[in-house]
Image (spheres, rainbow, N blue to C red):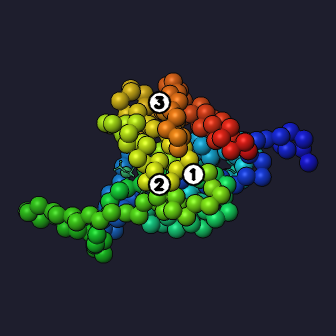
Amino acid sequence: ENHLLQQLPLRGKKVLITAGPTYEPIDPVRFVGNHSTGKMGYDLAEEAARNGAEVFLVSGPSHLHLQNPNIHITRVQTADQMHKACLEVYAEVDIAIAAAAVADYRPKNVASEKIKKKDSCLHLELEKTVDILADLGSKKEKQFLVGFALETENEFENACLKIERKNLNLIVLNSLRDAGAGFGVPTNKVTLIDAHKAATDLPLMTKENVAAAIFQRIIQMTHA
Ligand code: CTP
Ligand code: CA
């Protein structure tokens, strides 16, 4: 056995990561979705693997490629499929990070044929999707559970509410206010908040470096 490998901080640990958007079908050719590229989640997966973890990445539709051949990837489309894929490995993982931009609503009825254009308005009834992270929180045993929060107002308070509601150990608050943060850019500006509401502001940095900072914090908090 390679001596260096044994020193990696996440050696022997299993990590689950969700990434990307979900696509909720309207009819055979249309969906409700969002602009997530999956970049933050894929960078987290690479960082975990680099640190020696066995990584299970559950990814919504994304064009990104993985470098590390040791990452197990399950590709899904909908929130429901993402939820099921997470539950398949959740019991055995040590760390779970929800970086996916899961659609909050989905069409209540999915048309089996392509919806034809009419002169009148089209009314779509939407129902809530499953909150994957809240469900993982309710089933939490040994897992260290990390969520993201995307807020545009009362950011700190709303993020703290999510820590409680979803039973998290750590939340990564995304500031959409800052230029250079959010969807479709390679950089991000985040604040890490733990379950005691202790907050650390990180400077604007690449998503790769944000991923490294998140794992530094997780490793520190779990003495992994
Ligand atoms: N999340 C999830 N399943 C959902 C919705 C969100 O797993 N159906 C996860 C996200 O991956 C993220 C966290 O929950 O880690 C918070 O997502 P966010 O959209 O900020 O919060 P919501 O709980 O959806 O509330 P809202 O969008 O109203 O702020
Ligand atoms: Ca949401």
Cα distance in 3D space between marks 2 and 1: 9 Å
**Measured Cα–Cα span from mark 3 to mark 1:** 21 Å
Please tell me which of labels 2 and 1 falls first in the chain.
1
Q: Which residue is mark 1?
A: 145
Q: Nearer the viewer, mark 3 or mark 1?
A: 1
Residue at far front of view: 196
Q: Residue furthest top?
A: 203
Which residue is rendered at x = 60% and y = 43% of the image?
44
Q: CA distance from mark 2 to mark 3?
A: 22 Å
Residue at the limit of the structure toward the bottom, as seen here:
112
For mark 3, what is the residue?
189
**Figure quadrant of the C terminus:** top right
In-image side of 151 versus 210 (left or right): left
39, 90: nearer the viewer:
90
Task: Please report contact status of discs 2 and 1: CB closer than 8 Å, yes or no.
Answer: yes
Residue at image x 37%, y 42%? 158
Q: Earlier in the sequence, mark 2 or mark 3?
A: 2
Looking at the rendered structure, the kind of residue marked 1 is Leu
Mark 2, other Cα within 10 Å: few <14 / some 14–19 / many ≥20: many
